[in-house]
Image (cartoon, rainbow, N blue to C red):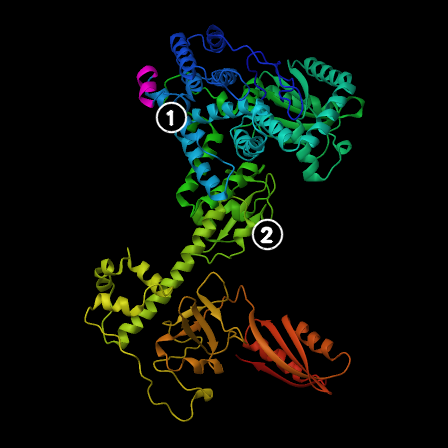
Amino acid sequence: MQVQAPNQAPRGAPAVVPAGDAPMPPAKRMMRQYELVERVRKYNPNTNEDLLDRAYVYAMKAHGEQKRASGDPYFSHPLEVAAILTDLKLDDATIVAALLHDTIEDTDATRTDIDRIFGPDIGHLVEGLTKLKRLELVSREAKQAENLRKLLLAIAEDVRVLLVKLADRLHNMRTLVYMPVEKRGRIAEETIDIYAPLAGRMGMHEMRSELEDLAFRELHPDAFKVIDARLERLAARNSDLIAEIEQQLTSKLAARGIKATVFGRRKHAYSVWRKMERKALGFEQLSDIYGFRAIVGSLADCYQALGVVHTTWPVVPGRFKDYISTPKQNDYRSIHTTVIGPRNQRVELQIRTSEMDEIAEYGIAAHALYKDDLGSPSETLNRESNAYAWLRRTIELLAVGSNPEEFLEHTKLELFHDQVFCFTPKGKLIALPRSATPIDFAYAVHTDVGNRAVGCKINGKIAPLISELHNGDEVEILTARGPNALPAAWESVVVTGKARAAIRRATRVAVRNQYAELGKRIVERLCQRAKREYSNEKLAGALPRLARASIEDVFASVGRNEIKASDVVRAMYPDYKEERATAVPRPDKSWFGLKTGQAVKFKVPGAPDDAIPIRGINSDLPVRFAPEGGAVPGDRIVGIMTPGEGITIYPIQSPALTAFEEQPERWLDVRWDIDEKTPQRFPARVAVQSVNEPGSLAQVCQVIADHDGNIDNLKMSRSSPDFSQLTIDLEVYDLKHLTAIISQLRAKTVVAKADRVVG
């Protein structure tokens, strides 16, 4: 916000300070004590003059002879911060906190002193600001993330902390030229990454724009100079056109009985540069450098003015937005439209009331937070402000985020995204970041809806869950009755922090549950072999000896091989002694030529449901398939427990199983659990001996393609002058699919032999 500090240029004038080799700005006279009181009295006739006077004198004496990098008295800084806040028309306590915000950190003053002289409310504000001053938001990722957590938590306790912090940062950016070069870049980066977007999210658009321009000027000085110079030349050339458009808009509205204040303003350098970068446009291609604003008297006047404008000049299609009926999440309300106005110029117009304009300029600071006794500022704001509601929801992520880096990622995503507005079938409005999907929508409705989502309808038509949503879409989420296995790809598709956090959490729970199920089977089987009775009650009594909080924790630890199953049985039965399993005599001829391991059961589809179900391949879960020619649905399969890795699935005819015949405790019953509605592909290997002639490889590949097989890898070697040996790694749906491909390969005249390879 281009708020006006004492003795500065009037609003609308450039607020950027010189840098580089530009001359230093002259030192300014500090604001007098009575001048500060008068600034507050202009908007608050009932101000506590004595409180302001005492704070002024106390802060000036506390900082004493301290100097800023500019050489000015240090007290000039808190005084300027207080001046910025008077432009926001804030209450006495916030102005006093601004005057005192550096006293605990930089002087001999203590929290006890502040409480005694100014009261605990102001003492709490000053202490909160003192803690924030120690935070460095541009640093190593983990440290930056943790500091951002602390910043938002402090703001959540009392939003006035944010207002003082933003004013403090604004004045520091205005005087950035005096800082050492090595610090300026860090401060500017911190401003454009955290503070400017946060000001925007709180609806404080003018402050955000000035912070962005000041940071942009420091980080990209050459680009800033070029854009700023071109904007100045454009302003000089089009000054008469701007006046003409203002005059015509005002007169057209007045002719219809609508009293309006119309004024034009150019866009800020950073917003122009960002649009050029985002859309890969040149400066000459930009048609919306100037925007016009019409301030009218009432809500009805807004729509009447819109009718006048649209019936006077041609409308640019697709450029109309009604943020009055559907306000932005930061409380912004206005009508936006673009018309072809005088001299065939595109005119971007915003139509709003003075109250809407005040909220658009000052954001949460414009709410009547301190004008009555309706409760604490944060409680009042929680009732009045959508922007503050967003902040509260962001704070809720603190409780569910697994680590600070995730929280930083989520918060930055939501800080920088524009919004789209969608509706539930019952008409409830859901605000989402731009590029959001129905998955984001589902989690915005409720976490349980997102976890059970299996499909969606957009505007009544079935659509993919990864579709991009647009303004006005009506979205209906189709859900499963029970828990749904979330695809791992969802995490990379969603754009909201809430959805990403919920998906990660659900995935972690699913992984843990599968480890726990695996661990439970291992413990129960060991108890069975040891002829000991297993019961949850028995294991619950042994939890202290295993140093685990719950039975599920024990099972998950066993599944991950963090605890041995024998240790669990011993904790339940202290007299248990582990004995090495001995192999039982086996017949000379065994099934498929494979020696049968002790206590191994082979389950096929339709068998009793006591085997571990295997659905597919997922690197997040403790199940994988044998790397050399794995199993496919339809194969009889067995699982081998691998310490630290989980289960490896082998087809029963695999020769690799002979390596485990003396380790029967590692053999597990498994069965297929395939969802026919969403078929998955599985890896298989085929060895093909083909005639060595032109086109033979193409024929082999064509057979596989014609039968919907997918070639993942192919190796070719010359077995003789007349034949080539092909080893093909395929992806197929099941054994029937694989058998059909092999049969068709054998039918080709160029194929001498085709067989499946099982590792």
Residue 30, position as x, y percentages in the image: 52, 11
Query: Main structural element of the magenta stretch: helix, strand or loop?
Result: helix
The amino acid pointed to by label 1 is: Glu
Viewer-nearest of discs 1 and 2: 1
> In this picture, which residue range is highlighted in magenta?
111-118
Direction left: furthest residue: 575
Residue at the image point whose x is 79% and y is 20% from the top:
237
Helix, strand or loop at mark 2: strand
Residue tagged 2: 463
Residue 362, position as x, y percentages in the image: 53, 22
Disc 1 and disc 2: Cα gap in Å? 52 Å
Instruction: Estimate how packed mark 2 is, as few (under 14), some (14 to 19) or many (20 or more) residues with alpha carbons within 10 Å.
Output: some
Residue 164, labelled with which disc? none
256 vs 419, nearest the viewer:
419
Q: Is residue 117 magenta?
A: yes
The amino acid pointed to by label 2 is: Ala
89 vs 448, nearest the viewer:
89
User: Is 551 left, or right, of 446 in this rendering?
Assistant: left
Q: Is residue 481 magenta?
A: no
User: Is 314 left, or right, of 416 in this rendering?
Assistant: right
Q: Earlier in the sequence, mark 1 or mark 2?
A: 1
Against 535, residue 386 (above or below) is: above
Residue at the image point whose x is 33% and y is 63% from the top:
555
Residue tagged 1: 127
Helix, strand or loop at mark 1: helix
Instruction: Estimate how packed mark 1 is, as few (under 14), some (14 to 19) or many (20 or more) residues with alpha carbons within 10 Å.
Output: many
Q: Quadrant of residue 54?
A: top left
Against 125, residue 608 (above or below) is: below
Residue 451, position as x, y percentages in the image: 45, 52
